Image (spheres, rainbow, N blue to C red):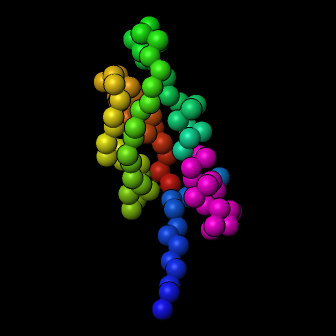
Amino acid sequence: QNTFLQEKPPVFPSCESIAIDSLQACFDKQVFSRIYKTFKVPQQITKDAYSGEVVVLFEVDATGRFRVLYTDALYKELKEEAKRVFSEFPKIQ
């Protein structure tokens, strides 16, 4: 027997009225939007003209809070800024 279970992603308030099959896309859009609006490139990185990526592994716990599990970047300041950004995310459902 083939059974397909779809896990419901965490829900931002602006995604509450979205169909379940579109919730993941809405969640992703909200996360990226908040990162782009809030992330401030540290002065040293701008000075060095660095262009690269920051890897962030996070979870939303059972209470709806974002928790950073792992960060990776060339600069310590980028890791710290990523953690700061996620610490400001709102609690969600």
Give me the residue at 61% from left, 47% from top.
29
Task: Check residue 82 for magenta coloring.
Answer: no
Q: Hey, which residue is sitting farthest bottom in the picture?
A: 1
Q: Quadrant of residue 17?
A: bottom right
**Magenta part of the chain:** 15-30
Q: Hey, which residue is sitting farthest front in the picture?
A: 1
Looking at the picture, tell me which residue is in the foreground, 82 or 50: 50
Looking at the picture, tell me which residue is in the foreground, 61 or 54: 54
Residue 21 screen position, x and y as percent: 63, 67
Task: Check residue 20 for magenta coloring.
Answer: yes
For the stretch drawn in magenta, the main secondary structure is: helix
Task: Note whether residue 26 is visible.
Answer: yes
Residue 62 screen position, x and y as percent: 39, 62
Looking at the picture, tell me which residue is in the foreground, 77 or 87: 77
Task: Note whether residue 16 is visible.
Answer: no
Residue 60 screen position, x and y as percent: 41, 54
Labels in figure, total:
0
Residue 49 screen position, x and y as percent: 47, 12
Q: Quadrant of residue 19?
A: bottom right
For residue 69, side relative to residue 27 (left or right): left
The answer to whether residue 23 is above or below residue 42 is below
Give me the residue at 57% from left, 53% from top.
27
Give me the residue at 62% from left, 53% from top.
26
The answer to whether residue 45 is above or below residue 38 is above
For residue 70, side relative to residue 22 (left or right): left
Give me the residue at 39% from left, 53% from top.
59
